[in-house]
Amino acid sequence: MKENVSYTIKKLSPMAKVIDDYTTEAKKKNTINAFGAADITMPRRILREHKEKTGESISFTAFLIACYARMVEKHKYPMNTLIKNRKDYYIFDEVDVQTNTERIIDGVKKPVNLTIRNAHLKTLREIHNEIRKGQKKKVELTTGNRGGKALIKYIPKLPRFIRKFIIHKIFTNPLLKKKLLGTVGLTAAGMMAKDTNELGWAVYMTPHSCSLGIGTMAKEYKLDKDGKVIERESLAVTLAFDHQVIDGGPAARFLQDLYYSVRKGCENEDWCFKSL
């Protein structure tokens, strides 16, 4: 007896094909994930106070990028380092942070890469403005947008082995990778679930030697030095690093400095909250 099955067939989008090639190449890296929780009570309080005073909501991702980029610059070897041909290290002075933001693509909100160039030299205000500008920019991939048109119209139409060859060339050429993908990554996909009040860590693949994954936020109750219960806010953080370039010791020291900067180290810096 023939079964009645209800279903819909939908073709993979051109972007889905490129993402599949991208992640397949990323799997070849010797990626290790380190997990932790950063205390974000102070920056969250300051940003809330800023909103109450001015009505302006500052991007928390911008704050993280501002701290992250300066710590990467401090530890540029090995954190801001890309490898070529398994033998040469390219240590970059410029910290270009590739992150993700939502844009309108053919009428639908989708995540799109955004690279903050020379992020280590920019203030929190400048990075915030750059992210907001990127979020407002409308991208129509099927109507002749420069860059988007080339990506969608031409690359997906090529045979898969050619697409994989092109992506492999990008991944293995440090100068080309810097130009197209930046030197380090930061993905904030977990921020979308910030209302769950549960810490959740992102595990992902990255083309970079160093990439920061931002998970969810949660309120926690801890004891202070006097034994009193205090409320703190924490953020789940994942550091994905290429073990061929970065060893565990440098990765741990980098995270320690980053946690301090996020927790209280940038409170009085001109490039941080004073720039708002």
Image (spheres, rainbow, N blue to C red):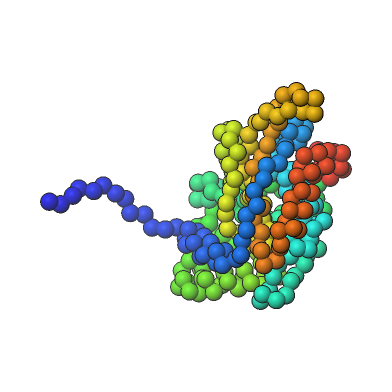
Which x, y percent locates residue 55? 72, 29
Q: How many marks?
A: 0
Horizontal relation, residue 271 to residue 113: left or right: right
Which x, y percent locates residue 72? 77, 56
The residue shown at (61%, 44%) is 215
The residue shown at (51%, 68%) is 155
In the image as oriented, which residue stretches furthest toward the left?
A: 1
- Residue 116 occupies which quadrant of the picture? bottom right
Task: Note whether 200 is above or below 82 in the view shown.
Answer: above
Task: Note whether 228 is above or below 138 in the view shown.
Answer: above
Q: Is residue 91 visible?
A: yes
Which x, y percent locates residue 58? 72, 37
Horizontal relation, residue 257 to residue 233: left or right: right
Q: Nearer the viewer, residue 142 or 116?
A: 116
Q: Nearer the viewer, residue 4 or 227?
A: 227
Which x, y percent locates residue 276? 81, 38
Task: Note whether 229 is above or below 104 in the view shown.
Answer: above
Q: Is residue 151 visible?
A: no
